[in-house]
Structures are given as structure tokens and as C-alpha cells.
Image (cartoon, helix red, strand yellow):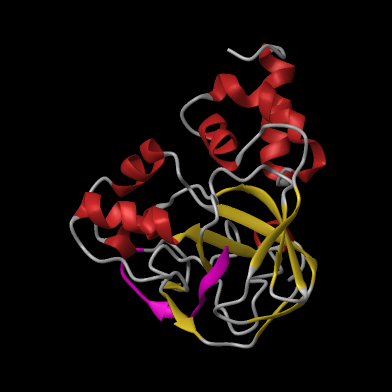
Amino acid sequence: MKLLSLNLGRPKAVDYTDQADGVTGIDKRPVDGPVRVSAPGPKGVGASGLAGDAVCELRHHGGDHQAVYAVAREDLDDWERELGRPLASGMFGENLTTEGVDVSGARIGERWRVGSEVVLEVTSGRIPCLTFQGHLGEKGWVRRFTAKGAPGAYLRVIEPGELRAGDPIEIVHRPDHDVTVALQFRASTTERGLLPKVLEAGDALHPEALKHAREYVEKYGGDVK
């Protein structure tokens, strides 16, 4: 398991974002590193966890619980076959393109050591937006990406440090529940009846996902439907 590609974005003016300034940092490109990784601060104030990486829409992106975004190269390869076009590492706006890691199958609260210093913790799946669709240039992309159910993972920074492309990835903690990124994503999008199950991940969940699940249970009860 390794960090195949380390990707950073720069602010770019586009016509497909609703961000007030009309700019986005979704177009991320590979760099060799080293790149400093640290907790960026609360959502709405903190941006990316990677030094030099642009997050332009702070209402929905960035912050401590979405400090880093990871996508498996294997998932990009699968999409390449389905779309019939090449997808460079970083094309999904991910900071980390991994090799040999089941990113969407990771458990909420799972911890990865990347390189010799950095420890990251899985918090949630990535919800697609129209900026992502515009960046890909694929009609109906939000719907297709959601239906696929392999969203990649947001991570928080537990131990800061430097990353480089090629760094090894080691799973150093795996919780004893079975709430994966893919399950949490489905619960938040297409299968809301799974939200009571998501609560098994506890405080390791992204706070917004945890709040969503608790509100559902308060309204509809705790049985998984």
C-alpha cells in the first residue's frame, strides 16, 4: 500500500462553480513533495490540510474533518474503463491517490500512517457537487458518481508531518465496528434507512454526518430499514 500520487490545486477561475469569486481548487496536479500536512482549523475558516493546496469554497470544503481527500487509483482506473477516457491522478480533486488501499471500504475512524510521520483518520465519504460535475465535464456526473458508491474518503490529521509521492501507507488502527466509508456515503445519499447503523462509528464520524444521523434517529427511530 502506498501513496501513488500527492496532488495540490491552485485557484482557477471557471464558469461551473457557484463559489462567490468564481474560482475553485478542484483541479489538483501531482507534486513530488515534500508537502507539510497539518490540521487546518475549523470548517469555514480552515482550508486544506496540505500546505500550498487551494480550497476556495469554505462553506462545503476544507476544515479539520475534511483536511485531506483520498481516492484509490483502482477506482480511477475503473472509471476510466467506464467513461472511455484517461483520468490523471488528482482528477477527482483528491490530495492522495493511493495504490493498494480499499479507500471506500475503509472504516470510519480507521487510521493510516503515511510515510514516517503523518497519521490520518477516516471521517466520511465525499458528497459530489456541481463543481465536480463541471470539472469532469460529464453529463449527469453527480448521479452517476453517487450510484457507483465509491466516493473516496475524507480524513482528519492526527499526527502532522511531511508527505512525498511514493510514501508507504500502513493501517495502524481499525475500529471494531463495520461502518465503512461506502456505507456512510449510501446512508447520507440513497439509503437513509442506514443512518442508525452509521451511529456505531460514534465521534469518529465527521460532525455533520453524525448530526445528520442523530436527527434521523430522533425523528424516525433507531431501527435500520
Residue 168: percent from left, percent from top: 63, 71
Q: Quadrant of the C terminus?
A: top right
- In the image, residue 4 lies in the stretch drawn in magenta: yes
Query: Is 104 situated left or right of 173 in this image?
Result: left
146, 17: nearer the viewer: 146
Location of residue 47 in the rendering, given as x and y in whole percent from the top left corner: 65, 70
7 versus 142 height, above or below: below
Please give the name of the residue rendered at 38% of the width and 40% of the height, measured from the top-left corner.
148
Give the residue drawn at x 60%, y 59%. Answer: 59
Q: Nearer the viewer, residue 212 or 152?
A: 152
Magenta span: 1-16
Q: Is residue 141 above or below residue 30?
A: above
Instruction: Please state which of residues 40 and 69 is positioned toward the viewer in this rendering.
Output: 69
> Is residue 95 shown to the viewer in this render?
no
Residue 159 found in image quarter: bottom right
User: Magenta part mainly helix, strand or loop?
Assistant: strand
Residue 58 appears in the rendering: yes
Measuring from the top left, give residue 123's x and y in whole percent: 68, 49
Report whether 38 appears left or right of 99. Answer: right
Q: Left or right: 94 with respect to 91? A: right
Residue 31 is situated, as x and y percent measured from the top left of the image, at 50, 85
Q: In which quarter of the image is residue 37?
A: bottom right
Identify which residue is drawn at 57% across, 56% down: 60
